[in-house]
Image (cartoon, rainbow, N blue to C red):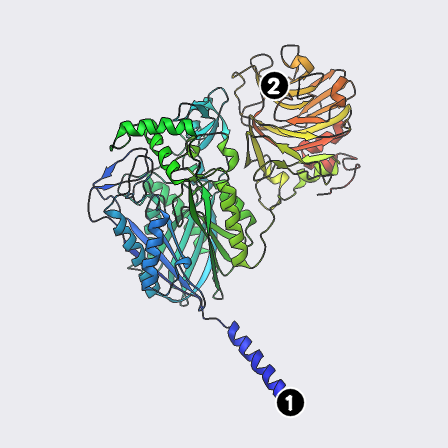
């Protein structure tokens, strides 16, 4: 009996080990021509309908099929502006009937070329009825052809920094330059390309993602098979019909591979996918006019991007032990439907239009309201897949760069790319705080109709799927702590807000004292902050919040009349724009100015472009004490407000000599536990620009203690800089 048990155990162990043996990773890639055979054809990408009768560059579907012996999956990147879920579901069913790949193991994404045939009815353009079934068949054919070419491969990963090829196109308008939306309401505080006139704007509304990511596959004999690239840049804007820079990149990469192999024909396939770039374009509005990328042609832009990709590609290290996993979910979401008044307005306009196409934006958006009212809700597809230690997540929308950064930063696997406009074309999904700023990306339509909370729901679904395919939890995002952050913590603040959040409403206290502050509406997140090298480590970018009418409020009981507030600030308002450029720090009652303390930057009323301190009612029309240094717009600066009983001192950029020094009785400010950052306590002339690294101390800091907060490298030169305790972060 004992012998039988031993034999049984050996058999179990043998079978378990055999079950763990998987086949080598295999891949096949193919390109199928999807250029329309019948011209003219409708083209997406504008407010109004347009036709194209010329083919400038081929329209193609590029497919990649992967197999590890247990899982088989397909990735297709098609030269299209957007593709509806219904069309893609049908194409997947066609492909599933001709292959061994299940429909929920197929990922089909659009490049977002604005010069490709229309298969998605949106704004003033209908889907081209002749081209839709043609593209559906080509999508399925691409998967079939890629599966037929499966062969053993090795896989590698690379990331290139292509920051000069992408930039934020959505900028925040000044509060006195708000524009009207198509419904006749003054709601546009942020919009695309608003920064073409610097006088109109206060700063970008979100971050960029400069990462050009690549998954590379080569045969076991070293022959290149395919590369899947991903980059967050909206489109170049080529003339139709064209695959835009996406197609040029793929063909250029193929030529370089062929050249590296000695020339001649190659079966290599490059796929360029659309990264999260709903608020991104190539024009860098932070540069003066004439140097923003206006000199680029689509060819020179693409060649520059290829140079970056090729350098990174050449350094890839490959391995052959990658297994596969993939997961999908279908998420129900609501549309933002019109209220009764807007619906009646829309119905009147649509009735007057009859059967003709819209001729102006009012007609476009009127028709969109009627459609959203009819539909009410929808379902979107989100996917995640894993190739060894490489992850890919998808969104079905025109997703902001911030959302892509959220997913990448928290993915269980550091090697993660995010494809948008995958498995559907459900329009823009601004993060919820961006809806408060309005603009084209938020106007309800098929191009931007999902509920306000669609972005966090889709991002969370993608992260949950990534956890599933990785078999491990997500990585909590926490900004690294460089020498400047260490200096703040060593000075023992009672609260320290790094303002590195992806979203509100909570600003987490990094001091360890759990005194979180709270953002109001009118704040956007994850912008570039000051001094990356000082506040972070390992090349990480420091992050900041941009204030556009909202404030940060903290309750600090028992603060008293001896306290200090240290912060970094970046002013977006011209000094000549209004009476005060904006208030930075305010301590007092929300019901009036009382005897509160208020620090800001002057405007037309007094001290334009310089720090000003006001006491209580002086903040409106009374005398204000001002600094001597003019602060340039759109530059990072450091300030510390120090109240020591009746004495007030304000320091700028680490200067040992106070910028402002005066006597002002503390009065009721010493009794108030409410501190406002980025605005005044009565919500008047709030800050327009960025804030970061805000620390509050329950004592009056000395000049020696202040120096390391502006320049952390002075710590070794300043005696006693860390006598108040060590970091708790």
Number of callouts in the render? 2
In contact (CB < 8 Å): disc 2 and disc 1: no
Instruction: In the rendered structure, find residue 610 and report the number of the disc placed on it.
Output: 2
Q: Quadrant of the C terminus?
A: top right
Q: Is residue 676 left or right of residue 193?
A: right
Q: Is residue 625 left or right of residue 178?
A: right
Mark-to-mark CA distance, 2 and 1 = 92 Å
Query: To which residue does mark 1 refer?
Result: 1
Point 47% across, 66% down: residue: 320
SS of the residue at dot 1? loop
Point 34% across, 58% down: residue: 93
Of residue 101 and residue 564, the one placed in the foreground of this image is: 101
Point 48% across, 71% down: residue: 22
Residue 495 seen in the current view: yes
Residue 156, percent from left and from top? 46, 59
Residue 426, percent from left and from top? 40, 43
Q: Quadrant of the N terminus?
A: bottom right
Of residue 268 and residue 605, the one placed in the foreground of this image is: 605
Q: Is residue 341 above or below residue 240?
A: above
Residue 183, quarter of picture: top left
Disc 1 residue crowd, few under 14, some 14–19, many 20+, Cα 10 Å: few
Residue 270, percent from left and from top? 36, 54
Disc 2 residue crowd, few under 14, some 14–19, many 20+, Cα 10 Å: many
SS of the residue at dot 2? loop
Q: Is residue 132 above or below residue 96?
A: above
Of residue 400 and residue 54, the one placed in the foreground of this image is: 400
Residue 116, percent from left and from top? 29, 43
Residue 212 seen in the current view: no
């Amino acid at each position: 009996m004992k012998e039988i048990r031993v034999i049984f155990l050996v058999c179990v162990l043998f079978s378990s080990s055999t079950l763990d043996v998987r086949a080598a990773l295999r891949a096949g890639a193919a390109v199928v021509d999807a250029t329309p055979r019948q011209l003219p054809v409708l083209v997406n990408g504008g407010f109004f309908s347009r036709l194209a009768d010329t083919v400038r560059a081929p329209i193609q579907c590029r497919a990649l099929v992967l197999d590890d012996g247990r899982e088989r999956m397909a990735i297709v990147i098609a030269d299209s502006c957007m593709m509806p879920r219904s069309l893609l579901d049908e194409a997947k069913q066609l492909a599933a009937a001709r292959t061994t790949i299940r429909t929920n193991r197929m990922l089909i994404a659009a490049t977002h070329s604005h010069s490709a045939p229309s298969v998605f009815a949106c704004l003033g353009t209908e889907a081209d009825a002749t081209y839709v079934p043609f593209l559906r068949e080509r999508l399925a054919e691409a998967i079939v052809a890629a599966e037929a070419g499966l062969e053993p491969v090795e896989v590698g990963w690379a990331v290139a920094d292509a920051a000069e090829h992408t930039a934020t196109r959505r900028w925040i308008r000044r509060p006195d330059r708000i524009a009207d939306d198509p419904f006749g309401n003054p709601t546009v505080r942020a919009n695309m390309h608003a920064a073409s006139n610097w006088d109109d704007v206060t700063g970008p509304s979100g971050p960029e993602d400069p990462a050009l990511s690549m998954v590379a596959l080569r045969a076991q004999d070293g022959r290149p098979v395919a590369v899947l690239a991903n980059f967050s840049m909206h489109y170049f804007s080529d003339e139709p019909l064209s695959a835009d820079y996406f197609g040029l990149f793929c063909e250029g990469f193929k030529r370089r591979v062929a050249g590296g192999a000695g020339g001649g024909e190659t079966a290599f396939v490059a796929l360029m996918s659309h990264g999260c770039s709903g608020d991104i374009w190539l024009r860098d509005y932070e540069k003066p006019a004439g140097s923003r990328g206006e000199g680029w042609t689509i060819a020179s832009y693409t060649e520059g991007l290829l140079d970056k990709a090729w350098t990174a590609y050449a350094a890839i290290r490959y391995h052959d032990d990658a297994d596969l996993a993939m997961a999908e979910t279908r998420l129900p979401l609501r549309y933002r439907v019109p209220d009764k008044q807007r619906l009646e307005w829309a119905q009147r306009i649509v009735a007057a239009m009859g059967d003709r196409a819209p001729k102006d934006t009012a007609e476009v958006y009127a028709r969109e309201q009627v459609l959203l009212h009819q539909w009410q809700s929808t379902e979107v597809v989100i996917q995640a897949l894993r190739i060894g230690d490489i992850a890919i997540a998808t969104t079905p929308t025109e997703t902001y760069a911030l959302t892509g950064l959220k997913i990448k930063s928290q993915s269980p696997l550091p090697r993660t790319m995010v494809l948008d406009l995958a498995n559907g074309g459900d329009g823009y999904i601004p993060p919820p705080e961006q809806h408060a700023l309005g603009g084209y990306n938020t106007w309800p339509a098929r191009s931007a109709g999902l509920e306000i909370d669609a972005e966090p729901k889709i991002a969370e679904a993608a992260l949950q799927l990534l956890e599933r395919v990785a078999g491990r939890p997500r990585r909590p995002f926490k900004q690294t702590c460089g020498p400047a952050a260490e200096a703040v913590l060593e000075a023992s603040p009672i609260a320290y807000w790094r303002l590195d959040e992806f979203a509100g409403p909570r600003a987490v206290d990094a001091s360890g004292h759990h005194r979180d502050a709270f953002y109001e509406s009118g704040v956007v997140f994850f912008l570039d902050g000051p001094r990356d090298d000082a506040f972070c480590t390992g090349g990480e970018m420091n992050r900041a919040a941009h204030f556009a009418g909202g404030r940060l409020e903290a309750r600090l009981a028992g603060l008293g009349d001896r306290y200090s507030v240290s912060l970094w600030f970046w002013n977006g308002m011209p000094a000549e724009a209004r009476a005060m450029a904006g208030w930075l720090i305010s301590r007092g009652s929300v019901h009036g100015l009382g005897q509160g303390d208020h620090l800001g930057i002057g405007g037309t009323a007094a001290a334009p472009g310089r720090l000003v301190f006001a006491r209580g009612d002086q903040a409106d029309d009374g005398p204000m004490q001002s600094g001597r240094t003019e602060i340039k717009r759109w530059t990072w600066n450091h300030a510390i407000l120090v109240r020591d009983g009746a004495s007030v001192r304000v320091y700028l950029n680490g200067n040992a000599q106070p910028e402002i020094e005066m006597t002002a009785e503390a009065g009721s400010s010493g009794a108030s536990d409410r501190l406002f950052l980025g605005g005044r306590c009565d919500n008047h002339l709030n800050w327009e620009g960025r804030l970061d690294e805000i620390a509050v101390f329950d004592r009056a800091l000395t000049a020696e203690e202040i120096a390391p907060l502006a320049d952390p490298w002075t710590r070794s030169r300043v005696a006693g800089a860390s006598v108040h305790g060590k970091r708790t972060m």
